[in-house]
Each structure stands twice: as structure tokens, then as C-alpha cells.
Amino acid sequence: MRVLLDTHFLLWWLDDAPELGDKAREVISRPENLIFYSAASLWELRIKESTGKIDLPENFATILQSEPFEALGVTVRHTEALRGLPMHHRDPFDRMLIAQAVAEKLTLLTRDEFIPLYDVASIKA
């Protein structure tokens, strides 16, 4: 399975947080699954960091690179996929994750209640 992590799951995995839950932990740790994180998530995290909403470690990029995950950049094709999305969700970062999952045929690992309203493969964990 090809899985795109919602931003909170990326943070929970890196922190080994109990909020991650058993189901998500199993999906992420299965060696046959290819796990992606989006540049949109990193953009969101850096904005939250700059506004004082979260604290990221100084070596956050190094920590992330040590994980066996694939980085997914934001492309023109992803922005085009936004055109067909209904406005169930107003958060621009979540909308980009949905568009990327659709465009790349990824399964989005999330707890977001709005994601199942879209025509996108998702795992609610």
C-alpha cells in the first residue's frame, strides 16, 4: 500500500506519541507499505512553528530524513487536482494532501472527519 501521512500522524510518529494509536502504528511500520509525507505538511509545520503554536526540534529535517519515508513535493499536477475538489474542507494544507493523494493514487492516513467526504482512499486511524 502507498500511504500519505496527514500532518498530525507525521508528528505523532516522529514523537512516538500515544495519540498515534495501534492501527496507524501498524500501517506505518509494515515493511511492505511505502510511506510518504508531503512538503505541504512541512510548510504547515514551519508556519505553526513561526507563530509559536508548536515547537520543532532544531534538527527536525535531519530527524525526518532518518525515517524510511518518501518526500512528496507539491507539483503543478497536484495544484490542478485541487480544481475538482468540493469545498467540504477549508484548510488549504488538508486540501493539498487530498489533491496529492488523488493525483498520486495514495491512501491518506488521517483522523480528519472531512476527508471521508472526498473521493479519496483513506484510512481513519
Image: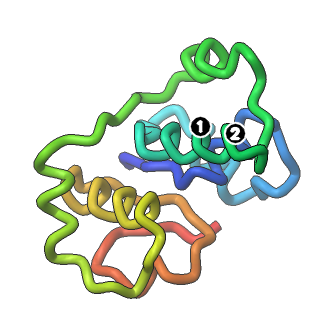
Q: Secondary structure at mark 1?
A: helix
Q: For mark 2, what is the residue?
A: 49
Residue 114, image x, y percentages? 50, 82
- Distance between mark 2 and mark 1 Cα atoms: 5 Å
The circle on residue 8 is none
- Describe residue 74's horizontal placement relative to residue 40 as left or right: left
Label 1 packing within 10 angstroms: few (<14), some (14-19), many (20+): some
Residue 105, image x, y percentages? 24, 56
Disc 2 marks which amino acid? Glu
**Is residue 61 positioned above or below 28 on the image?**
above
Q: Residue at x 46, y 39 (%)?
A: 37
**Is residue 118 positioned above or below 79 on the image?**
below
**Is residue 114 positioned above or below 16 on the image?**
below
Q: For mark 1, what is the residue?
A: 46
Q: Residue at x 13, y 46 (%)?
A: 76
Q: Secondary structure at mark 2?
A: helix
Colour setup of the view: rainbow
- Describe residue 23's horizontal placement relative to residue 102 as left or right: right
Residue 55, image x, y percentages? 80, 36
Disc 1 marks which amino acid? Arg
- Describe residue 65's horizontal placement relative to residue 121 as left or right: right
- Which of the two residues, 18 or 99, is positioned nearer the viewer here? 99
Residue 85, image x, y percentages? 24, 77
- Which of the two residues, 122 or 99, is positioned nearer the viewer here? 99
In contact (CB < 8 Å): disc 2 and disc 1: yes
Q: Quadrant of residue 125?
A: bottom right
Q: Residue at x 62, y 38 (%)?
A: 29
- Which of the two residues, 100 or 33, is positioned nearer the viewer here? 100
